[in-house]
Amino acid sequence: MPGGTGAAGQPPDGEQRDAAAGIGPVDSVDTTEALAALLRQLRRRAARRNGRAQLTYRQLSARTGWAHGVIGDYFAGKTLPPTDRFDTLVQLLGATSLELRLLATARDRVEEARRSRPGVHGRAGPPDGGPPGTDDARPVPPVPRQLPAGIPELPGREGELAALDVLRPAPRGAGPLVVALDGPGGVGKSALAVHAAHRLGERFPDGQLYADLRGERRVSPAVVLRRFLCALGAPTLYAGSASDAAAAYRTLLTGRRMLIVLDNAVDATQVRPLLPAAHGCAVLVTSRGVLAALNGAVHLHLAPLPPPASVAVLGLWAGRGRLTGERGAAEAIARHCGHLPLALRIAGARLAARPRWPVRELADRLADPARRLAELSFADLDMRAALEAGHRELLARGASGRAAARVLPLLAAEQGELTVADAAATTGGAPPATEVILEQLVDVQLLESRAPGRYRFHPLTRLFALRSANRNGEGARAVATAKRRGAD
């Protein structure tokens, strides 16, 4: 052909071999394993050219924002990278423009081969590798992608994201992996779960299911199961019992690799019917309290952010360059927000909405404890509402929960760390009964316990407890007591 090119503008075979001499052969690649071998060759070649060690998965993760475990799956041939990610990866590894075209063609060939191969991911053939071609006429089930939009960056959560890298399909014969995130209101459980699910979603090519279980408002598992069954391709609206729906749900997940995100669970009872049995699935659950009764779950407890990361989160929402020149004011805002991601997001949104305000203006407004929670509200974001959810959950626990709610403001009036004896003296209760109350408050994340018999309030939770938690007059008495003692 004129100009020495083949069909569709591709170089002739000889030129392809020359172009890919350092990473070939390219034209015979049709599996993820063979494509991964090319990626490993590119990685070695880049190290030789730069005279350095090969880029680690963590270094590539830092440059791309992808989970390092997912990058490892690309290089091991366990997962086929999406087109845009594949292009980014080979460019980072130093591929030339000609190599980019050849590698892109190879990647597309792998994807086409996977689609035409019977039994891939349990779709075109029977689940778990049954004889191919035995039920090719079966309708292809839908691939649900139900995750809400995620937050692009999560400063300060690198350790938690690394811990969540365990989410992957389990080996055959094992049960599904379940990871449970817990923490106080506003600590960023939902944001972290959705962000991680997006990062790791490619390990689960058969889709991602998502449900907001609404915490203490408690969405019934039967309602969620009907939604999931519909998303999984159940032919009609399921009208059987809840147990029958759970069985149908587990059946439909057999042979699939899916990630299920259950957000804002209130307890293990609500979660258990929604757990799959298939080893190819994984579950990520968020809740205020620790779901300690959820058998086999890996638990991850979230705490407020470190101060430097708090300022980074504030800047992320306030806008590029907004904090420049007012670092001290930004640090004060982060401190008044108690380093909670939700409070920082609200403060950042308020700064973004008032581009002519100096940062110090908001810092001064938040410095007043009496108005701090009122200032931490913007549009549909409200720090007080996040804390009220824990209080409603406490009241829903019956007489013991209501007893804990009654003394909450009195406990908040005490400064520093509380012991059982301190709390009993403050409330006038017997130590054993007081300890039960304190533990109830810990269960709903209105109080922290960092050691047996020792308790403390998060600063914003203390303010909420003093001003909002009680409705029977104890709140006013507690506020007066706190003012005398200098509570902030």
Image (tube, rainbow, N blue to C red):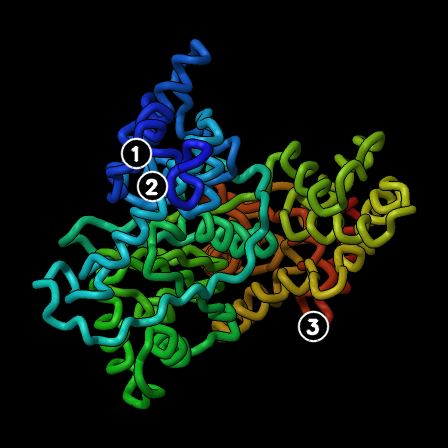
* Most foreground residue, 320 or 110: 110
Residue extending furthest front? 2
Q: Secondary structure at mark 1?
A: loop
Front position among marks 1 and 3: 1
Measured as percent of width and height from the top left, residue 259 is found at 36, 58
Count residues near mark 2 (Cα–Cα under 10 Å), then give few for <14, some for 14-19, many for 20+: many
Under mark 1, the amino acid is Val
Is 221 situated above or below 107? below
Task: Give residue 54's quadrant in the image.
Answer: top left
Under mark 3, the amino acid is Arg
* Most foreground residue, 289 or 349: 349
Mark earlier in primary sequence (1, 3): 1
Under mark 2, the amino acid is Ala
**Residue on which the image places disc 1:** 26
Residue 274 is labelled as: none
Measured as percent of width and height from the top left, residue 309 is found at 63, 35
Mark earlier in primary sequence (3, 2): 2
User: How far apart, in angstroms, are the residues tagged by discs 3 and 2?
Assistant: 67 Å
Residue 471 is labelled as: 3
Count residues near mark 1 (Cα–Cα under 10 Å), then give few for <14, some for 14-19, many for 20+: many
Is 23 situated above or below 139? above
**Residue on which the image places disc 2:** 106
Q: Secondary structure at mark 2?
A: helix
